[in-house]
Image (cartoon, helix red, strand yellow):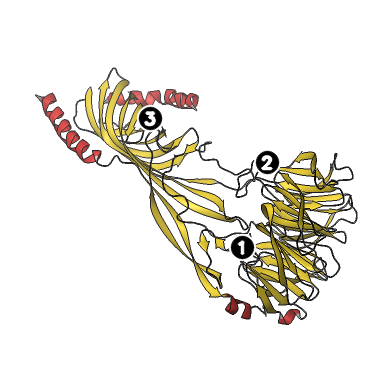
Amino acid sequence: MPKNYLFVLLCALPFFAAAQQGEKSMHLYNITQFGWLMGDNAHTTSIETVTGLSYKRYKAGLGVALDNYGYKSLPVFVDLRYNLSKNTKNILQFYGNGGMNIPLQSGNLPYKYNNGDVWHALHPSFYGEAGVNYVLRLGKLLSVNAGLGYNYKTFKYTEYNYQGDIVLMRTATSYAYHYSKYVLRVGFGLW
Amino acid sequence: MKIRSIAAAVAIPAVIACIVISACTKDTGYRTVKVYTPVYKSITDVTASVKTSEPEGVTASGKMLLLGKYIFLNEVNKGIHIIDNSNPAAPVNKAFINIPGNLDIATKGNTLYADCYTYLLVLDISDLQNVSCKTYLHNVFPDRASVLGTTIPDGQVIVDWKTREATENVSVMPGQGIWKNHEYYYNGPWYDLYAGAPQSNAYNLASSGKSNTGIAGSSARMAIINNHLYTAASNVLSAINIATPSAPKMESQNATGISAQSIFPFNNKLFIGGSNGVSVFSTDNASAPLLEGGFGHFCSGDPVIADENTAYVTLHTGNWCNGAIDELDVLDVSDLHNLKTIRNYPLTSPKGLSKDGNLLFVCDGPALKVFNAANPADIKLLQTINLADTYDVICHNKIAYVSAKGGLYQFDYSDTRNIKQLGKISLPQ
């Protein structure tokens, strides 16, 4: 997976380079950031990467993340950014994204019982983040980023159980967890 | 100057945002369950309404009993299907008897005994088109006085359930969110609500093999030996005199020593299968069976069958006691005071079983397995017949009646090298 990602980035370098023609031309951009999630019940890590198109002060892209808060998941989202200034070296930008949180199967919630019946069914749900990001360009292509945001994800699943003694009844209980936390992000960008 | 302006433009909203947002960083959880509320009816009203009615579709098949050309098939907690099996290749669903709370069936002559929660109903089946309830006994199955936390009032039975959805808060524990080292952190009440739609997971059949009684299977909780009906209900073994079939008399209720879930009669012995072991009772004194021996095992499955010197017990996971063993235990029962394990055979998820001569049939989760059990210490697998979720099996006249997720199957095993499916009663999937 990481190899594929690097391969795609390398292939896209000429398009990023086109960005140097000036901000008025549309060009590709990529931001990859590590995150430190700070919620009431846990402090943990995340990583995300966003690739999209930049035009003037606006950026729109698609992102994917790995989020360890509460229950490990793979958020997939649409990302929008707006540069507060026209300065192209030191940039403050607002960003916001929203999409789908895809929970990842793990031993924490066993998928099936020994007899093969489904035990836990995980359901995709909402993911979103908003905040402010500081971008410092280090050269023609590379930049470093640091940001602070508010992150929210929902995690839903259905648990199937057997209750009763003489007659076992299969029961279904739905769970929905809402995780809200700050996120501190640092990373690099290709512009 | 420009940098200051930008810093101020960002910092002020950021601080305000932090203050506002800080109130929103609380993790919250909810769980939604279906709450079932029982609908009651008096036992006199229920017994008065027991009669033959139009056939109904089989949706949750339970225990099964063979009687002549008929198959009596329990619809879990609802009643009994009467199936004409004159032609095993094309069984016909003829009628339905509505009995709320019914799980078990036994017959003697023209009398059918059926449980109705704690009650034992006595039905006249001399005319299957006009079945009626003649009488009933109370407290034969005391373990069914409470259903999913609801205690049934005296003189009442549950005839239906009303459902509604309820949502409650679930605390998210500090530390690492709600999951840590594969453990689930939840500090709310577990059993204040119960959820889900009842589905069949009951197993099948009950048998004594006597000529004027029905033939049932390894998971039955009722068995007839001569003039006595024996019922196993959790830790209670009841002996009921049915010398006059339509006027049963309770003669004794004794502790089984285990959490009994099935009963298998052989000669003058009763093998009681429980979630935590097997008990063997002698019926030399038919009115008060005497405990002769027992064998304990980890909390697991329960069905048991036996012959002269050997008992076969299946233990399976996925039941209420969360046992961790899936195996067939073969016991030496030649000395009832000293039951010994001959050998354990690991299986997938074994449940009901039946034996005909040296052939042993075991419902093993996704398959019906046929073994040569000529040597109990070295049972050989002969054939595996793939069937989803097999529950129980009865072998009779070279036909294996198999209850499984897809329906009630019949297999001709007169030629063990060529076991053929004869017919099937389908269940909705």
Q: How crowded is mark 1: few (under 14 residues within 10 Å), some or many (20 or more)?
A: some
Q: Provide the residue designation for mark 3.
A: A44
Q: Depth check: B113 or A171 in front?
A: B113
Q: Residue at 17%, 37% (x, y): give it.
A: B16
Tell me the residue that label 2 is attached to.
B325
Q: Where is residue B18 in the image (x, y as percent from the top left)?
A: 21, 36
Badge 1 sits on which subunit?
A: B
Q: Is mark 2 on a helix, strand or loop?
A: loop
Position of B238 compared to B24: left or right?
right
The three-letter code of the residue at mark 1 reads Pro
Q: Are marks 2 and 3 on the same chain?
A: no
Distance from the alpha carbon under mark 1 to that under mark 2: 28 Å
Q: Where does label 1 land, which residue? A: B142
Q: Is residue B427 visible?
A: no
Q: Which amino acid, by three-letter code, is at mark 2?
A: Ile
- Total marks shown come to 3
Residue B147 position within the rendered picture, expressed as x and y whole percent measured from the top left: 55, 61
Q: Nearer the viewer, residue A175 or A18?
A: A175
Say which element carries label 3.
strand
Q: Chain letter of disc 3?
A: A
Q: Is residue B201 above or below residue B378?
A: below
